[in-house]
Structures are given as structure tokens and as C-alpha cells.
Image (cartoon, rainbow, N blue to C red):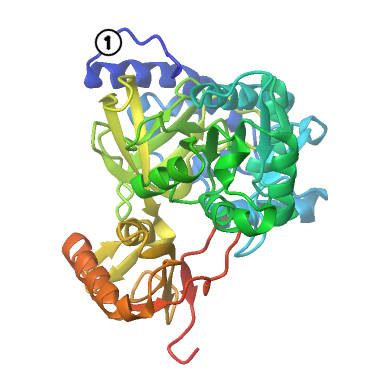
Amino acid sequence: MIHDFDVPTRDPGEYLAILNARRWQKLQRQIRYVWSNEDYFRLRFQEAGIQSPEDVRSFEDFRRLPAFMDKERHRDSQDASLQRYGHPLGLHLTTAPENAIHLAATSGTTGTPTFYVFSRKDLDITYEVLGRMFRAAGIRPGDTTFHAFGLSLWLAGITYVQALEAYGARPVAVGAEGGVPKILRYIELTRPRVLFATPSMVNQLIERAPQEIGKPVGALGIEVIYCSGEPGASQLLFRQRVREHFGAKVFDATGGAWHNGTITCDSEHSHGMHYLAEDYCFRYDLVDPDTKVPLELKDGAVGEAIHTALEYEAAPSFRNATGDILKIHVGECPGCGHFGTRMEIVGRVDDMLAIKGVKVYPAAIQNVVAQFRPKVSGELRIRLDAPPPRVEPPLRLVVEAGESTPDSEWGALRGAIEQRIRELLTFRPQVEILPFGSLPRTGAKTKLIEITGRGA
């Protein structure tokens, strides 16, 4: 059951107008709250020409403010607070350090990790939002759930495990760090109803279960698979593959950061992720990726997302340019009939590829390649000579063959993939087919882009 926000209309325009009015009521309080932070937020306001909270007079005024934070500024704020105050919680910390009782972090694979800081109030709201997502996925209090996301400090790690316990479920927290053999053995032992894992991990379990435990994953009794952390779980062919091998329902979700929460419904086709945190988080404040001018929020709008938590207490996301490119849908979901806002993550600003004037995101390339399963495994890498966005054509794409695809078919497969990408994405890549198992697997996020240089 998707959460009902009690907005008394089925008209998309009226629906957004009511939501915007509610957002503005909370934003006025949150603006005054973050203004009290003199080390960071007040400086950002003043740089934007705002001399007091009352200078932001409307929802439209708020949306015209520039971004106050992004990943680089976040890391700089942490470094500065470490030097000045002896803690890495950031100059943008808006509560006393002793009130910051929980930390999560990004993986830090491309640099210094950025921390998510939670007060008790922040954790309570996070558990409520994640609980809505668990309920939407059909997870019941008392269910045994198996946690195969990376644990460490990732948001989908300890934070999720604690949220599941608060919800009343029973998480078995082995984590991706345990490795595929241990994960499969513990699933066989504990018999969970629900599996939490990245799409990459799900594919590994399908491939390796017969050799590791002598039986297919369908014999393990998993009914619900809850995916997050990387693209792929919304793809039709992935969902069909999971149903074929596990006999399970698939849900694609994002959530946990500053009260954000989205999840797909139980439909064969993904129609975007239902937004379940309208009352706590303004996640789809869309701006033009180039000019940063606010875009009209309406059905079908696509833009760079600015993230603002409406009630967050400790180091909040406020005018935060997360780098996500989102498309929103407003109205009735064709899959489940629920009326509301749905989101698609089209790509990221920092991984957009520009190929002779054509703008494309790696996730779009991944979606096209996935159409060729089972001829391909679904594993691929985009190999570039230099960091994006500019790509000197042809774009080099390596694609792993399916387990049963003979090398005699690779030539035709390569041509078919090149032609399909040309038809759908308006550029022609240079495709290389690799044997099954050539590309490294990971239970965490798979990086689709590799910077190699042609001589590598």
C-alpha cells in the first residue's frame, strides 16, 4: 500500500500547488533555523544577497536561490570543521556536536567520504520514511530480512538495519563484505522472506548459487527483493530475470539521505519510483543543468535536482546540488493506480557524456545493452581516455557475453548492439564483446565508466 498524503485532488497541477504551499510553510521555519548557523549557511545566504530570513518572501524566491552545497563544498566544510573544531561533521552542522548521535557516509570511492549526520529527531523521521518504503515493498513486521548491502558506514548499511529493527523486522546483517559464498550459506540457514541487495549482488547470487550451495536461488524461498545503490533494478529484463530465478517481486528504491524516500510499485514494468517523503523532503526542486534556472515543476519535467530537507536538524541538506538528473511524473501510476509524484533517475551531472553534441548518460547505455539479454550478461564498461563529459568518438564500450553465447555469435551481437544504440541514443559506439566472467563483479555499486587511455 503506497502512503497516502491526503491531498484532496486528482489534478496534477492542483496536487503540486497544494504540496508547494505545504512545503513553503515548513521552509519558512527551516530557513530561520539554518540562518542561525553563522559558519556556513548564513554566509551562503549573504553571498546570494539575502540579509535576513524575511528577504525570502515566497516559495518562488526560495527556488531562485543558488545551490548552497554540493559534494565538493560538503567535503571542504568537513575539512574546515576538522581544523577549526576537531570534528569532521562540517561547518554546516546546525546542532551541538553531542546531539549528533548517528553517522553514515558515502563510499568515498572517488575521494574523501562525505558524512550524513543524524540527531535523534532526524533518525526518528528517517525510520518513519524508510518504514513507509518497507511497507510499500510488502515487508511485514516480524519478517526475517537478509541484508546484503555493504554495511560499513553506507546509508544502506547500519542505518537501514536499525530502521528495519525499528519497523519490527528481523534483519540478518551479513553485508556484502561477507562475500557471495557466505551470503548464500546464511540465506540457506536463516530462510529470509526479503533480500536487500544491489542489482549486481542479485546477479552474482543467481550465477553462483548452483556451485556454492548446490541448488538454484529459487529454492531459497525469497519472496521480495529490495534493490538500491545502483541503476538496473527498474529495467524490465532485470525484473523478469529475478522473477524467473527467484520467483520474487522486485522493488527499486532510494532513501535514507536527509529524509528522502522513493520506491517502485509491484508492477512488471517500472513507471518510476513513488515519492514517499513529500512531508519531510523537497527532493525534486529541478533546475536547468546548464543555466541553473528553476524549471516548472510539472508532469514530465527533467532537470538537475536540488535537495532540501524540510525539518532536518543536524547538518541538513539545504539547497544541495546532489548531481542527480531527475524526471518527474505527476498523476496516476499506470502500474498500481496510486496518484502522486514519481521520479526517475536519468543520470548524474558529473557522468554525462557529450559525444559530438549528443548528451547521453551511462544508465541509458546500460538500459539499451540490457535489451540483449541473455545474449549478454548485463555487465559492461564504458572506457574513456579522459574524464567526462567530452568524449572523442567513437565511444568505446565493452560488453560481456552471456554464459551460453558462443564466440561465433559475437560479431553479429556486436553489430546489433552498435546499431541499436545508434537508433535509440543517436550515436554509434565501438563495441567489444568479452567472454562471460571477464568483468569483475562487486556487491556494491558498479562503476560503469573506466578511465583507461587507449594504450591501457
| Residue 49 in sight from this viewpoint | no
Tell me what residue is drawn at x 64 percent, y 59 percent: 211
x and y percentages locating residue 346 in the rendered image: 35, 49
Which quadrant holds the N terminus? top left
Query: In the figure, 160 relative to 434: above or below?
Result: above
Tell me what residue is drawn at x 25 percent, y 16 percent: 14
Question: In this view of the protein, which residue sits in the foreground, 131 or 177?
Answer: 177
Left or right position of 319 against 169? left
- Residue 35 appears in which quarter of the rendering? top right
- Residue 298 appears in which quarter of the rendering? top left
Q: Residues within 10 Å of mark 1 (few under 14, many from 20)?
A: few
- Residue 179 appears in which quarter of the rendering? bottom right
- Say which element carries label 1: loop
Q: Amino acid at mark 1?
A: Thr
Question: In this view of the protein, which residue sits in the foreground, 172 or 22?
Answer: 172
x and y percentages locating residue 183 in the rendered image: 70, 49
x and y percentages locating residue 10 in the rendered image: 25, 13
Question: In this view of the protein, which residue sits in the foreground, 40 or 163?
Answer: 163
| Residue 246 in sight from this viewpoint | yes
- Residue beneath label 1, please? 9
Left or right position of 89 against 12? right
Query: In the figure, 406 relative to 317: above or below?
Result: below
x and y percentages locating residue 414 in the rendered image: 29, 75
Query: In the figure, 288 relative to 93: above or below?
Result: below
Query: In the figure, 284 relative to 413: above or below?
Result: above
Left or right position of 359 against 452? left
